[in-house]
Image (cartoon, rainbow, N blue to C red):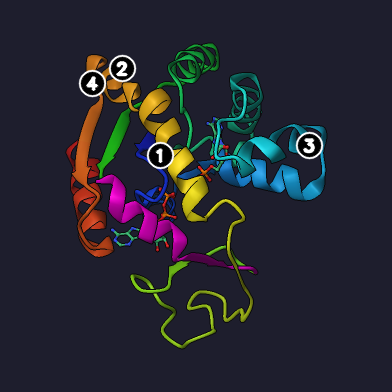
Amino acid sequence: MNLILLGPPGAGKGTQAKIIEQERGLVQLSTGDMLRAAVAAGTEIGKKAKAVMEAGELVSDDIVIGIISDRIDEPDVQGGFILDGFPRTVAQAEALDKLLAEKGKKLDLVIEMKVEDEPLIKRITGRFTCAKCGEGYHDEFKKPAVEGVCDKCGGTEFKRRADDNEETVRSRLEAYHAQTAPLVDYYAGKGILKSVDGMAPIDEVTNQIRAVLDSV
Ligand code: ADP
Ligand code: AMP
């Protein structure tokens, strides 16, 4: 199964994608993670993306479409994928349709995570991840069971994203409403959109997503 988790920054896409990945054998494809890796590695793409990401704006469609197109060809993705953070513009969604058709694949489902803006600021400014395995945490909503130790891998170093500050989050939310929100209608029009309540606690959101996945 190939699906998209659609929602603004902080909606919980990464959190839920990692759970569904484990449970259903699908692969999470996060363009944000891929771009951050490119920035860290200092590649040409990373150099182009760095300042745009720091400003909370969108990287060019051509760059992200190219990254996703290459990634979808890799062997580990052939059993199905969960797109997280892509597409983010109608042009990206159209390009995705085209490239999937060319590769003989299709999108089965788009799950919209419905959330309100203001609580997202708190979610994003409290977000941190394990530096070793990437498991996601939150200062208040998802603390490690033992403080300072990753539940998943036992790692003791954690990191916070440079763009997870209030000012940049507001720019990212603006970009979401202006450029990404139209995708809700785009996919509703194709008859593959389902919605879940992203304001519910993490476990409840997971249960809603499981129910949607079982219904298709
Ligand atoms: P996204 O990938 O959509 O940007 P994340 O999955 O990284 O969002 O979630 C943002 C932050 O909010 C993380 O710190 C995560 O632990 C926390 N979080 C995710 N889902 C919920 C939820 N349903 N309720 C409260 N906090 C959540
Ligand atoms: P994310 O990890 O999804 O929150 O993305 C972090 C940042 O990476 C965004 O604010 C954008 O600058 C950039 N980015 C990630 N995915 C895309 C995309 N599909 N299109 C354009 N920019 C993206």
Q: Secondary structure at mark 1?
A: helix
CA separation in Å, label 2 and label 3: 32 Å
Q: What residue is drawn where x is 45% and y is 22%? A: 89
38 relative to 207, above or below: above
Residue position for label 4: 188
Query: Which three-letter amino acid code belongs to the residue tagged 4?
Result: Ala
Residue position for label 3: 47
Does the magenta run of residues contain 79? no
Q: Secondary structure at mark 3?
A: helix
Circle on res. 173: 1
Mark 1 touches mark 4? (CB < 8 Å): no
Which residues are drawn in magenta? 116-131
Where in the figure is residue 145, as x and y percent of width and height?
41, 84
CA separation in Å, label 3 and label 1: 23 Å
> Nearer the viewer's eye, disc 1 or disc 4?
1
Q: Is residue 13 left or right of residue 32?
A: left
> Nearer the viewer's eye, disc 2 or disc 1?
1
Mark 2 touches mark 4? (CB < 8 Å): yes
CA separation in Å, label 3 and label 4: 36 Å
Q: What residue is drawn where x is 29% and y is 21%? A: 187
Q: Quadrant of residue 47?
A: top right
Mark 2 touches mark 3? (CB < 8 Å): no
Residue position for label 2: 186
How many numbered markers are drawn?
Answer: 4
Figure quarter occupied by ligand 1: bottom left
CA separation in Å, label 2 and label 4: 6 Å
**Looking at the image, is mark 1 or mark 4 earlier in the sequence?**
1
Q: Residues within 10 Å of mark 1 (few under 14, many from 20)?
A: many
Q: Secondary structure at mark 4?
A: helix
Query: Which three-letter amino acid code belongs to the residue tagged 2?
Result: Tyr
State whether label 3 is within 8 Å of ligand 2: no
